[in-house]
Amino acid sequence: MSDSRQQALAAFAFTPGASPLHRAHPAVAAAPLVALGVVALAAGSPLVIASAGVSAWVLGWACGAKPAMSQALRFSIPLAILMIVVNGLISHAGATVLFRAPEIPVIGGTITLESLAAGGVIALRVISVALLFAVWSACVDPDRVLAALRPVARHSALTATLVSRLVPVAAADFSRLKEGVDLRGPAAAPVGKAELARRVVAGSLDRSVEVAATLELRGHSLRPSRRNSTGEALRNVAGDGLWPLVSGCAVAVAVGFLLGAGFARFESYPEVAMEVSWQALLLTAAIPLLTLLSLVPWGLGARRWNR
């Protein structure tokens, strides 16, 4: 694995900070991100989906997750372009024909404006969801997630947390092994990627045994006191502030009203049709503003958070 790819993976790792998402309880920090995720996946209008993506970028930028979001865009934009192309080639519905070529088996030869528009909506969903996951990965401490989920799903929470921590370690092992192979010189026997992967897997299995033994010695195999741990989690929620939760609820209410009232209708087939009213524009612009409610108790200045 190259250094650039290793740095890309490291950008998604949690970085300690003092922003509202860093300080909030994981259940509270998840509220605005989950609300925006529902918007990106459930809304049909590209205007609303783009608003969710912009909201995720603004929230992540204010909380110091810009490197993670930049890497998320590097990964998601090529995938989004591929989805537009594939949907244009596979789906032939629509009344506006842009290109007509000889029929090709499975793919066909007709490309319509409507199929490209439908692919563009899917692409916007991918980019918005990728940004939300990047903000979550960079701003929410996986150890606090484990502590919050332990009373409910102890083994699943521990597994997810270990995976998020050990994947970058395995990537670093691969990079070190590749560097060692390159330093042996041209006269040495070549080592393929399969052999390097086998050694990384073997090392990961050895590390997993050591981690399991360490966790057992620290008492993770014992059943925790549900009453005490649940009470502590509730105290943490109340002590860390509820403004991200308020923000998530406000976004959910605004989007629910926007979709329920039919202000943001979008149709890809048989012809592209999007209704843009002043109510739709107002509520769409309100989504980023409501997301910024998460930052109210601390303001928008990173200096204040880092004091």
Image (cartoon, grey):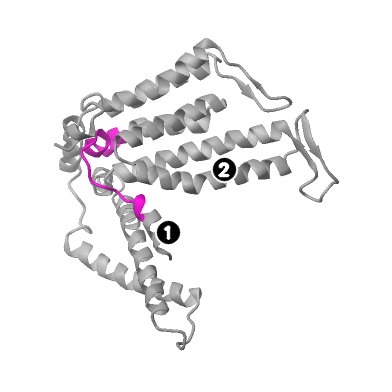
Question: Residue 266 appears in which quarter of the rendering?
Answer: top right
Quadrant hosting residue 218: bottom left
- Read off the magenta span: 10-30
Question: Where, by quadrant of the figure, is residue 253 drawn?
Answer: top left
Frontmost residue, 156 versus 19: 19
Where the C terminus falls, by quadrant?
A: top left
List x then y, in percent, for residue 190: 49, 83
The amino acid at mark 1 is Arg
Q: Residues within 10 Å of mark 1 (few under 14, many from 20)?
A: few
| Point 58% across, 37% down: residue | 122
Of all residues, the one furthest to the front in this rendering is: 186
Q: Which mark is residue 80?
A: 2
Looking at the image, residue 150 sits to the left or right of residue 179; the answer is: left
| Residue at x 41% of width, y 18% of height | 286
> Which disc number belongs to residue 5?
1
Instruction: Please check the rendered image and state whether residue 23 is part of the magenta-colored stretch, yes or no.
Output: yes
Specify whether residue 34 is in view: no
